[in-house]
Amino acid sequence: MAPGSALIPRLMDLSPGTEALRYCFALPAHPESVAGARELTRARLDAWKLDQDACDAAVLVVSELVTNVIVHTASTRVVCELSRFGRRLRIAVQDQGHQPCGPRLRPSSDDEHGRGLLLVDAMSSAWGSHDAGDASGRIVWAELPHGVEQLAGAERAC
């Protein structure tokens, strides 16, 4: 793993000249943090000048992944990392404890729950999960293509 990129394994080959931007944030694993995660995601993607459709999709994916941590784990905090590699946006969310089998695409009979990963699957070009390398939880990631309105002035963070 690259320094400063604890959540996202080096799965993408970056050719010379490819701009990569990263931004991380951590929030308490409480229901009110879902709104905070949406706000932080939207603010960062707006600063990176991503197009509105990509921004809306990313905010939805972050919301679903953070909600899954809060509902399905015993975590006290959730960590989210946004990374832009060329025309791809990767979202990674880490919990502090996970179910033994990992996340599954299985809607429940309950109309209010169980559809989060189906939404992530529908919105993403790819997604998956893996145990954190230091046994500190599970990471669920999703990748979305995006257009960029303007690259100049984008900030580097994380």
Image (cartoon, rainbow, N blue to C red):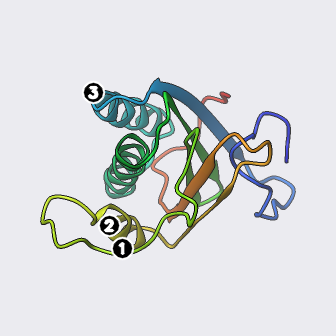
Amino acid on which the number 2 mark rests in the picture: Leu
Element at label 3: loop
User: In the figure, is residue 49 to the left or right of 154?
Assistant: left
- The residue at 50%/44% (across/down) is 150
Query: Looking at the picture, does residue 107 appear above or below residue 132?
Result: below
The Cα–Cα distance between marks 3 and 1, rounded to whole angstroms, is: 25 Å
Please state which of the two labelled residues, at mark 3 or mark 1, is closer to the viewer.
Answer: 3
Q: Does residue 95 appear to the left or right of 21 in the view shown?
A: left
Instruction: Judge left or right: residue 41 versus residue 9.
Output: left
* As drawn, 132 above or below 78: below
Callout 1 amino acid: Ala
Q: What crowding class fits label 1: few (fewer than 14 Cα within 10 Å), some (14-19), or many (20 or more)? A: few
Callout 1 touching callout 2 (CB < 8 Å): yes
Q: Which residue is mark 3?
A: 32
Query: Residue 132, how many percent across, how many down?
Result: 71, 48
Q: Position of residue 48 (x, y in %)?
A: 51, 38
Q: CA distance from mark 1 to mark 2?
A: 5 Å
What residue is disc 1 on? 122
Q: Are marks 3 and 2 in contact (CB under 8 Å)?
A: no
* Marked residue nearer the N-terminal end (3 or 2): 3
Residue indicated by mark 2? 119
Task: Name the residue nearer the viewer: 111 or 48.
Answer: 111
Could you say whether the residue bearing mark 2 is in a helix, strand or loop?
Answer: helix
Secondary element at image label 1: helix
Q: Residue at x 55, y 50 (%)?
A: 98
Residue 69 horizontal/vertical position (percent):
44, 44
One can see residue 153 in this view: no
